[in-house]
Amino acid sequence: MVEQAYRFQTATPVYCERYGNGHINETYLVLDAAARLYILQRINQRVFRDPERLMQNISAVLAHIKQSAASHREYMTLIPDKDNYMWHVDDEGEYWRMYEFISDSICMDWVEIPDDFRESALAFGRFQRRLADFNATSLHETIPRFHDTPNRYTVLHQAIDADAFGRARNVSAEIDFALEREEYGSLLKKLHSSGEIPTRVTHNDTKLNNVLFDRTTRKAMCVIDLDTVMPGLAVHDFGDSIRFGATTAVEDERDLSKVSFSLELYHAYMDGYLYACGDALTPLERELLRDGAKMMTLECGIRFLSDYLSGDTYFRVSREGQNLDRARTQFKLIADMEKIWDELLAD
Ligand code: ADP
Ligand code: GN1
Ligand code: MG
C-alpha cells in the first residue's frame, strides 16, 4: 500500500495499485473500506516545477466546468487531504492529489471504432467551449513554452550536439527528417505572435486516453489530465488528438509497416470537433487545423527523439529504444499526412 493513500479524506484504504499508462505522473487506483474508488497521483516535479500553482489551476478550471456540466461524471472531483488541503505534501516534499474515480468509466489507449474518436472530439470541443469565458491570463503556465515548437527544435539541436549517449549516429535519418521541417516548425508560433490566431484556454495534452467514456453507452463524458491546461492554441489541441488517435497503430509500435495515418479517423475527429466548437473558431483557425495536426505530430516526434538522444529522462520507458520507436511512428504519420495534404482541409 502506498502510505500517502491514508492521507486523504476517505474511509480506510484497503487496496492501492499502480494504474493507467501515463508517461509523466505516477497514478494509483485506491479502494477504501466503504467500497469507493479513487485515483491517487504523485505529481512529477521534474516536469511540473510549481505543483501548488498547478493545483490552483486545476481547482479553478474544475470549478468553472462544474457550473455548466450536466452531470457530476462530466468533471473530476478532488478529495481534500486530512488537513483540508486540495493536495498533500509528504515528508520527502512529494506532492500527491486524489480524485474521485469516475464510476463506470472506461479509458481507451487506441481508437476501436471511428465513433469513439468522434466522441472524444466532442468532449475536447465541449471543454474548449466551456472554458471560452474563463480568464486565460489567470492561469499559471505549468510548463513554460510547452507547445513552442521552435524551442523544441533548439532542445533537439542541443541534444544532437551533446550526443551524451553516443546515439546520434544511429538515427541520422530521423534527425534529417526533423531538421528538414525546422522552418515549417515556426509557422503557428509566428501567426500567434502576430495576433493572427488567438490565445485560448487549452488542454495541451488531448490524447484519447485523457478522455473517460461511459462504459455502457460509450459516450465521452469527462476530460481528465488537466496538468497542462494553460493559455494556448486551439489548433494545437485539435492536432494533438489527431497525432495520437488518427493512426492504425499505437504510439510506440516497432513495426512501422503497421503505422499509417487514417484519413477516416481524421475526418471523424474533425466532424466531432467542428460540431462541438467550430463556430467558436475563426476562419483562419479552421484553415489551420491540418497544420495543428502536422505540427503536434512533428513536435512530439522531436520531443521523443531529443529524449532518446539525452538518455530517456523525460518520457517514462519500459524498454530500450522505446522513445526512438515513438519518434519513428510520429515521423511516419507526418510523411503520410504530407502525401494527402490537400485532403486534410476542413470543409
Ligand atoms: P498521466 O498524466 O500520467 O497521463 P492521467 O491523469 O491521465 O495521468 O491518469 C492516468 C490514467 O488514470 C488515465 O488514463 C485514466 O485511465 C485514469 N484516471 C485518471 N483520473 C481518473 C478519474 N478521475 N476517474 C477514473 N479514471 C481516472
Ligand atoms: C505525455 O502525461 P501523458 O502521458 O498524458 C506528455 C504529452 C505527450 C505525451 C505523448 C506533460 O502525456 O505532452 O504528448 O506524453 N505530457 C507532458 O504520449 O509532457
Ligand atoms: Mg494522461
Image (cartoon, helix red, strand yellow):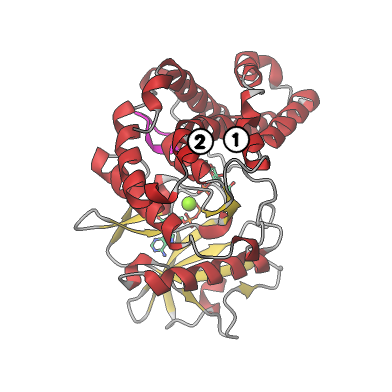
Classify the position of ligand 1 by quadrant: top left, top right, bottom left or bottom right: bottom left
**Residue at numbered disc 2:** 292
Q: Is residue 161 above or below residue 118?
A: above
**Residue at numbered disc 1:** 188
Amino acid at the residue labelled 2: Gly
Looking at the image, which residue sits at the far left? 216
Q: Element type at marker 1?
A: helix
Q: Is residue 174 above or below residue 231?
A: above
**Nearer the N terminus, badge 2 or badge 1?**
1
Q: Relative to residue 182, is residue 335 drawn left or right?
A: left
Name which quarter of the figure residue 135 lies in: bottom right
Identify which residue is drawn at 53% across, 63% down. Answer: 41
Instruction: Please state the horizontal and vertical placement of residue 156, each as a whole percent of the image.
Output: 71, 29
Give the main secondary structure, helix, strand or loop, of the magenta stretch: loop
Q: Looking at the image, do the residues carrying marks 2 and 1 touch, with CB atoms under 8 Å apart?
A: yes
Q: Which span is picked out in magenta?
A: 244-251
Instruction: Please state the horizontal and vertical placement of residue 105, each as a whole percent of the image.
Output: 30, 60
Amino acid at the residue labelled 1: Leu
Residue 239 marker: none
